[in-house]
Image (cartoon, coloured by chain):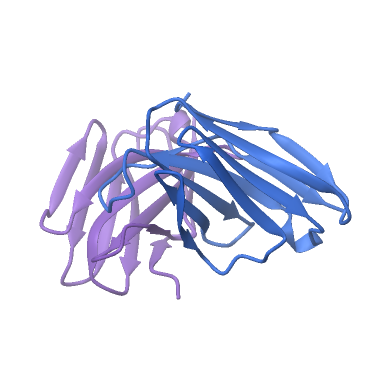
Chain colours: A purple, B blue
Amino acid sequence: SQQGEEDPQALSIQEGENATMNCSYKTSINNLQWYRQNSGRGLVHLILIRSNEREKHSGRLRVTLDTSKKSSSLLITASRAADTASYFCATSLSGYSTLTFGKGTMLLVSP
Amino acid sequence: ETGVTQTPRHLVMGMTNKKSLKCEQHLGHNAMYWYKQSAKKPLELMFVYSLEERVENNSVPSRFSPECPNSSHLFLHLHTLQPEDSALYLCASSQGGGATDTQYFGPGTRLTVL
């Protein structure tokens, strides 16, 4: 069964606005990672948050993790047209080494 | 550029053809992966190689055959594919096969099976 599931499936905003994407998962995890994919290209790693961390920042990105709710959120502040892409969360299950990806959130940032 | 290259970038093949996808990583990593990405589906892990040994095979049909001759190269040999195998095939590598290792992806091969 699918481990990570992103919400919403698609998000359309204006430049300068903030974008928030959520990820829910079903079982205990070792860590959670967020990746970005531009149309038809490979995925690019954005940030990793471990199961014992609650919040992490990287530039305009802010990731939170709530293990009690089995959920994570990715916030992109002051969005730019170049942020237009699909965003995926990927979980690594406790005791396993491979990543399980969700279906992703398609973000469109209009100028 | 992520340091992972894939060739070809696009491939159209008939169901009776035999072709191979190639992946090369220039990062000195020890683990390599093949993923399949179909429309409206989660990314599916197909194979994992760690130190040139296959450590995971996620019930992939035998018409897909991986090969890892060394830690820098990974191939996916294709034969007698079906139209439903049309997808974006992504290769990735990581330093180790561990749970905290970041995976670096290639640009993918867009495969169309006629």
**Residue pictured at 34% horizontal, 61% vertical:** A23
**Residue pictured at 45% horizontal, 28% vertical:** B2
Res A66 quadrant in image: bottom left
Q: Position of residue B106 (x, y in %)?
A: 53, 35
**Residue pictured at 27% horizontal, 55% vertical:** A32
**Residue pictured at 10% horizontal, 57% vertical:** A52
Residue A108 shows in this picture: no
Relative to B100, residue A2 above or below: below
Q: Quick one: B101 or A61, which is closer to the camera?
A: B101
Relative to B7, residue A31 above or below: below
Q: Position of residue A107 (x, y in %)?
A: 47, 45
Could you tell whether A102 is left or right of B101 in the image?
right
Q: Quick one: A67 or B68, which is closer to the camera?
A: B68
Q: Quick one: A105 or B112, which is closer to the camera?
A: B112
Could you tell whether B30 is left or right of A28 in the image?
right
Could you tell whether A19 is left or right of A67 in the image?
right
Residue A111 shows in this picture: yes
